[in-house]
Image: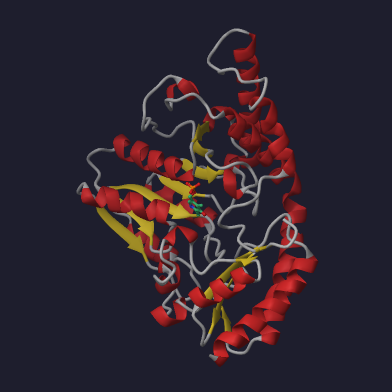
Amino acid sequence: MPSLLYFDYNSTTPIDPQARAAMLPFLEHSFGNPSNSYFLGRQAAEALEQARSEVAALLGARSSEIIFTSGASESIRTAFHAALEANPKKKHLLSCTTEHQAVLACCHEYERRGYQVTLLPVDAQGMLSLKALEEAITPSTALLSLLWANNETGVIFPVEEIVAIAQRKKVPLHLDAVQAAGKIPINLEALPIDYLSLAGHKIYASKGIGVLYVHRHAFYQPLFAGSQESERRAGTQNMPAILSLGKAAQLAKELLPAAMKREALLRDTLERGLLEKISNLSLHGRKEYRLSNTTNLGIAGIQAAQALLLLDQEGLCCSAASACHGSSRDPSHVLRAMHLTPAEALSSLRFSLGRFTTEEEIERALEIIPRVVKKLRSL
Ligand SMILES: *Cc1c(COP(=O)(O)O)cnc(C)c1O
């Protein structure tokens, strides 16, 4: 990507060259179906299990707890299904106002089917109240589903405390860890949660592949029953994508400590530079306890939608709200939940950095963004 300035890694990541290389044999001669017992099938099955163990290693999980899906949306939907089928008499769902659309859509779907849904509020920093969380759990709560790290603000929820509450109240817990994976350490061996969802295309693997982690003692029921994935999901596995994910998981684990430091340095340079060059700028989300690659900034006096157009003309990709929002003229539900006015939410931009971001790109962004803001403010 020579002239493109890509600052939208939380929307999707490019495929790492090593992850792409891992896919190629499975797009060529190694085309076997892992369910077949002749050589080609056995070769595929072996590669499949190798990839599964690499994903398990990234999470501190067991291979038997990893189910490959088509993406995080399917994983999330399956976790809801499994947890709710486990306790069909319990009709209460507990989640949060700042969740990703993939979780909110599940909540709305079950609401239509007669479930009572409670979405917990957050404070102006995007943080959840643990006391309010504990108090919202009722004897009929069938599932607690929360984001580990927020895709729009990078705010990280205190997962250890959340796990302790879920255990004390004996409520199944699902975590949307799509943005946490590869950005902060995850060790599920030390964190007894029931379900966890991941997406390949947020950690430098291909699109169309996701992971559902199901704890060995958690209830499970497939969304589509079939023989694959140890009878936990129907459908021949997406082998090229799975192989890219295995490699991506291995790289994510290996590179994590260095990546956290490097991205924090680049992000802080960007943030500091913008704060120096642009007046009336505000940072959204708790400053300390957030992902090291993400910054979400309110820029008074501009329309984010217009800024996106001008930045796009300069080859700079960033985001006004979550990309899944459809029309970017809807104020972000995450920023609204953090007590921002619609106008404030509509003047906010998210920049998210990643593995291939360079210092030189930050310098170019620090020239382009203030110039675009100045132009918009003078209109
Ligand atoms: C991207 C994302 C999802 C959905 O992932 P898909 O691959 O589109 O299914 C869910 N949750 C979070 C936090 C995300 O960032």
Image coordinates for residue 231, horizontal then vertical, percent: 43, 22
x 39%, y 44%: residue? 172
Q: Percent from the top left, x then y, of residue 346?
A: 45, 77
Position of residue 38 in the picture relative to residue 24 (left or right):
left
- In this view, the residue in front, 306 or 149, is 306
Q: Horizontal and vertical percent for residue 118?
A: 30, 59
Q: Which quadrant of the view contains residue 37?
A: top right
Q: Residue furthest front?
A: 313
Placement of 150 over or under 378, stated as above or below: above
Q: Along the horizontal axis of the image, is 315 left or right of 77?
A: right
Residue 341: in sight, yes or no?
Answer: no
The one nearer the camera, 347 or 109, is: 347
Return the residue nearer the eye: 357 or 288.
357
Residue located farthest toward the bottom when viewing the structure as drawn: 378
Q: In the visual, does 165 lie left or right of 68? A: left
| Residue located 34% across and 49% down the image | 106
The relative height of residue 186 versus residue 152 in the rendered view (above or below) is above
Residue 365 higher or lower than 30, as above or below? below
x then y, percent, for residue 124: 47, 76
Total numbered badges shown on the rendered structure: 0
* Quadrant in which the N terminus appears: bottom right
User: Which residue corresponds to the image point at 55% horizontal and 61% vertical from the top-left?
Assistant: 156
Q: Is residue 234 visible?
A: yes
